[in-house]
Amino acid sequence: MATGDGRGRPRKRDIDDAVLRVTRELVDERGYEAFGMREVAERAGTSLGALYRRWPGKHDLVVAALRAAARSIDVTPTDDPEADLLKGLVLLAQSLNGGARPLLAHLLAKPDSELSHAIREAKIDPFGAAHRQRLRRVIGSPPDFEERAALAPALIILTTMTTGHPPGQDEIRDRIMPLQRPH
């Protein structure tokens, strides 16, 4: 299947998917600094030119790869804003059982690195914006909204760091979500 932006030859979706998958694998295996665009092209079975036609550089490629992986924590809005809020927080917690954990460790260890900037741009910022939107549907816009919006994700991450595992759905619903509500 080909996709295109109206310029040149249509893009092949399978190349995009392979490149993004290989990029995530390389980030997981060796970290951001330890691989280059040429290695991505070789492992994905494409040319270096094809990579640069799609992504201007390594940072853009890594951001795209992380964004593609972040789609697994997207929540389609329903008629039940509380259920949507809970689902987003549960998906965040579940992501901490997998690939998000090393990324979180990198953010904490090297907050100013290029990979940390890519993680924020691709994962943290989009999740935060979506979470605030879901929370606003539940509690409106109290004066301390931003603090309340930061609370649940922070508690999920802190619980994961201190106990070794993320909180489950019941704990998020019963202990964490009520802290976001205005009293």
Image: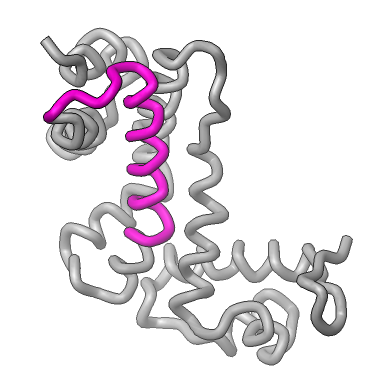
Depth check, front residue: 20 or 177:
177
Does residue 164 appear anywhere in the picture?
no
Query: Residue at coordinates 19% horizontally, 72% vertically from top-left?
Result: 112
Asked whether, in this view, residue 118 is left or right of residue 145, the answer is: right
Query: Residue at coordinates 42% horizontally, 29% vertically from top-left?
Result: 88
Q: Is residue 88 above or below residue 173?
A: below
Where is residue 42 shown, x and y percent of the image?
Answer: 66, 84
Does residue 92 appear anywhere in the picture?
yes
Query: Residue at coordinates 39% horizontally, 82% vertically from top-left?
Result: 34
Where is residue 151 shown, x and y percent of the image?
Answer: 17, 31
Asked whether, in this view, residue 113 is left or right of residue 18, the answer is: left
Q: Is residue 108 above or below residue 6?
A: above
Q: Is residue 5 magenta?
A: no
Applied colour scheme: one colour
In the image, the segment drawn in magenta is: 120-143
Q: Quadrant of the C terminus?
A: top left
Where is residue 109 shown, x and y percent of the image?
Answer: 16, 63
Q: Quadrant of residue 117?
A: bottom left
Query: Residue at coordinates 27% horizontally, 31% vertically from top-left?
Result: 165
Q: Main secondary structure of the magenta part?
A: helix
Q: Quadrant of residue 22?
A: bottom right
